[in-house]
Every structure is written in C-alpha cells, then in structure tokens.
Image (tube, rainbow, N blue to C red):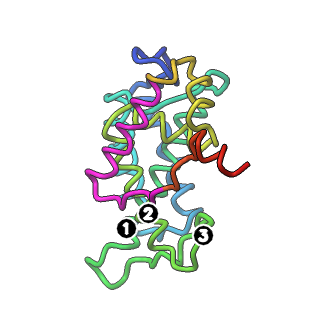
Amino acid sequence: MIRQRASPGGGAPIVEADAEDIEAMRPMLLRHARAIGVASAHAPDIVQETIITTWESLAEGRVRGGERTPPEASLLGFMKQTAWYRAQNLSRRASTLYEAPASALRDVPILVTPDPTPGIEARDLLARAMASSPNVAHVVELAARGLIGADAARALGQPRATFHAQEKKLRATLRKLGAAPAPKQAPRPTWKTRKRQR
C-alpha cells in the first residue's frame, strides 16, 4: 500500500511503498517511456532502471510527497521524472550508433538557451545534489516552487536561521560537484551611503 509518513527532520512527508506497488507501475512506465519517444527496443531497459532507482530512493527516504498531494500521485510523478532522466541519459550514451538522439524525445523541457546541453547538465547537477541529502533536496524543491529565503522558511515552519543553514549546505554541495560559483552581487548600501545620496 502506498502511504506517507512525517519526515523526522521536518518538511515534506516521506512516501513509502511495497515492492508490489512498484511492480504494478511497470505497464504505466512502459507506456510513458514510449510516449516521450523512447524506442521500443530500449523501453523495457528504461522501465527496469526506473524501478530500481525508485526502490533505492524509497529505501533512502528520498521520495517526498505533499500535505495536499495523495502519496500515489507523488510516487507516480517521481517515477515519471526518473524515467525522463533515464531516457536523457540513454540518448547521450555513445555505446551504439542506433540509440535515439535527444531531439527524438518528446516533451523536452523549455530551456533558456537554444543549446539544451547547459540545461541538461544543470538538471543532472541538481539531481546529484538532491540525492546527497533530504534537506538539500527540500531546498531545491521549494526553490522550484518559487519559495526562497524567508518565504521558504515560513512554508516549512522553520526558523530563518535553520533554513539558511540548509541553503548554505546546498551551495556547498553544488560547489563540491563542480558548479560554477554564483556571480557576486553589489554590496547593499549602508546607512552612510544612503545619507550621502540624499
């Protein structure tokens, strides 16, 4: 039975499922793989890799739900997203000459630049960062919903200082994985500067 429980560290609830629940998703995943453009010859491999990744993520408590989202929907979304990542990895693999190119995959995410490579690399980097820690994953999920800083802390019901520490951990993880540092921002004006400008 697919269910969810409260996270010990706070934040989004953790989704739990049995092996039978995961296996029951196989036909849906096969249809999804074909729908996003994976060749029939590779679809079973994508599905198997997705099931393995989902099972490992469930065991580590990395599949998160929502207070108003049914756990079945959260698990389904996680598995579909994982299948998409697996399809992207397959499309970039150069082991054979007959694997589908990335352009053959449908429903490609909207990217800022014409070249999709930076966007794909950024998604992979964030995926690795999210896999490093549940707290880091939660910061990324909130940022994807447009909640950062004090707004994100309020949404979690945490003190701002606690959430700031989690944000610092995310930045440190990204640096460790090789992400380019964020551009330096101009210093905030002090009261003396503002007084001189009057």
Specify the amino acid type for callout 1.
Answer: Leu
Task: Tell me where residue 57 sits by quadrant.
Answer: top left
**Mark 3 vs 2: CB contact within 8 A:** no
Q: Nearer the viewer, residue 16 or 180?
A: 180
Name, please, the residue furthest toward the right. 198
Label 2, secondary structure: give it.
helix
Mark earlier in primary sequence (3, 2): 2
Q: Is 130 left or right of 194, judged from the image as shown?
A: left
Residue 158 % position (x, y):
52, 18
Residue in the picture at 49% in, 57% down: 84
| Residue 172 inside the magenta-drawn segment | yes
Neighbourhood count class around disc 1 (C-alpha, 10 Å): few under 14, some 14–19, many 20 upward: some
Q: Which mark is residue 90?
A: 1
Q: Are marks 1 and 2 in contact (CB under 8 Å)?
A: yes
Mark sitting on residue 112: 3
Which stretch appears magenta? Answer: 162-184
For marks 1 and 3 on the same chain, the one whose residue lies earlier in the sequence: 1
10 Å crowding of disc 2: few (<14), some (14-19), many (20+): many
* Residue type pointed to by label 2: Ala
Q: Which numbered tag is attached to residue 87?
A: 2
Q: Are marks 1 and 3 in contact (CB under 8 Å)?
A: no
**Separation of marks 1 and 2 at Cα, in angstroms:** 5 Å
The residue positioned 58% from the left and 46% from the top of the image is 189
Up-down relation of residue 61 to residue 97 (above or below): above
